[in-house]
């Protein structure tokens, strides 16, 4: 299937590792020009650019979800690189779910440890998308893919803040779809996914997750990336406002 992505201009936030890196690679494989955003590790972003080919096909920009001006500057730099953006993949996040054995109950969690992160992971993504929307509207075509998690709907011990932030993105997509002017916006919600970050997770938790997954295994980052690429392409003709799980049946 020709996904119509040749020379399309794609911004992937948080593209230096995991699902973001796999997604950047998958878009590049389809002929897209990819902007690789990073929070602080410019060297890792440069490595991804090299992996994708050259500065003619990929470019790195800094973007910090906790800083509204950084979001604007990052999106504008991405647009200026190739004269606009056709696809935005809002993948970056400023924290991960924490094992409940390693954090206090919600009522004992200091406000300054989560309040700003909650805002960044909701408002930061919304700000990223809204900054890119004007150009997409003017061209009458665009694709937005937001990264969520199955925990937004299923929950998990210790995931109160994380799940709340991800669920907010579902509501954002459902609202934006009514005022999209040719732009399709969807949410991808992975479950347990094989990335380098799993090296820091207790193996017992991973085994429990695997046993609770109907397919009997965790998802790979490349499998999630393929869905993101489809939703961000011409192959997606009219899927809009949906939350699609990539979690082996969970």
Image (spheres, rainbow, N blue to C red):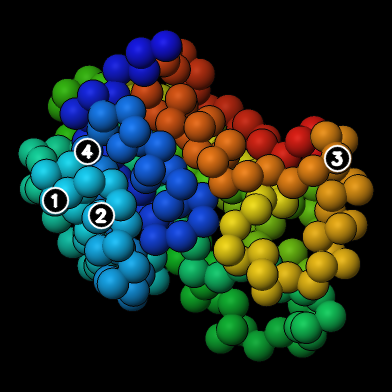
> Which tag, 2 or 3, sits closer to the chain's start?
2
Label ID, residue 55: 1
Q: Residues within 10 Å of mark 4 (few under 14, many from 20)?
A: many
Query: SS of the residue at dot 1?
Result: loop
Query: SS of the residue at dot 2?
Result: helix
Distance Cα–Cα, label 1 vs label 3: 40 Å
Q: Residues within 10 Å of mark 2 (few under 14, many from 20)?
A: many
Distance Cα–Cα, label 4 vs label 1: 9 Å
Q: Is residue 136 left or right of residue 228?
A: left
In what quadrant of the picture does the C terminus appear?
top right
User: Mark 2 sits on what residue?
Assistant: 49
Q: What residue appears at the point 23 percent right and 24 percent down from the top-left corner?
A: 6
Q: Is residue 131 above or below residue 224?
A: below
Q: What is the number of callouts on the image?
A: 4
In the figure, residue 132 lies in which quadrant?
top left
Query: SS of the residue at dot 4?
Result: strand
Distance Cα–Cα, label 1 vs label 2: 7 Å
């Amino acid at each position: 299937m020709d996904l119509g992505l040749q020379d399309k201009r794609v911004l992937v936030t948080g593209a230096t590792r995991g699902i973001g890196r796999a997604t950047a690679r998958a878009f590049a494989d389809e002929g897209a020009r990819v902007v690789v955003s990073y929070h602080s590790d410019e060297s890792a972003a440069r490595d991804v650019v090299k992996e994708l080919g050259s500065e003619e096909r990929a470019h790195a920009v800094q973007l910090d979800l906790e800083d509204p001006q950084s979001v604007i500057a990052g999106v504008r730099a991405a647009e200026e690189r190739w004269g606009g953006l056709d696809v935005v993949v809002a993948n970056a996040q400023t924290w991960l779910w924490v094992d409940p054995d390693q954090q206090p109950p919600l009522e004992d969690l200091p406000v300054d440890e989560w309040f700003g992160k909650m805002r960044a992971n909701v408002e930061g993504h919304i700000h990223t998308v809204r900054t890119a929307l004007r150009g997409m509207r003017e061209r009458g075509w665009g694709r937005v893919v937001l990264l969520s998690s199955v925990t937004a709907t299923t929950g998990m011990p210790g995931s109160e803040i994380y799940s709340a932030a991800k669920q907010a993105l579902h509501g954002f997509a459902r609202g934006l779809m009514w005022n999209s002017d040719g732009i399709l916006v969807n949410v991808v919600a992975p479950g347990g996914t094989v990335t380098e970050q799993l090296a820091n997770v207790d193996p017992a938790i991973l085994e429990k997750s695997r046993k609770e997954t109907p397919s009997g295994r965790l998802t790979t980052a490349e499998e999630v990336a393929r869905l993101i690429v489809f939703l961000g392409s011409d192959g997606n003709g009219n899927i809009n406002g949906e939350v699609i799980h990539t979690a082996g049946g969970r």
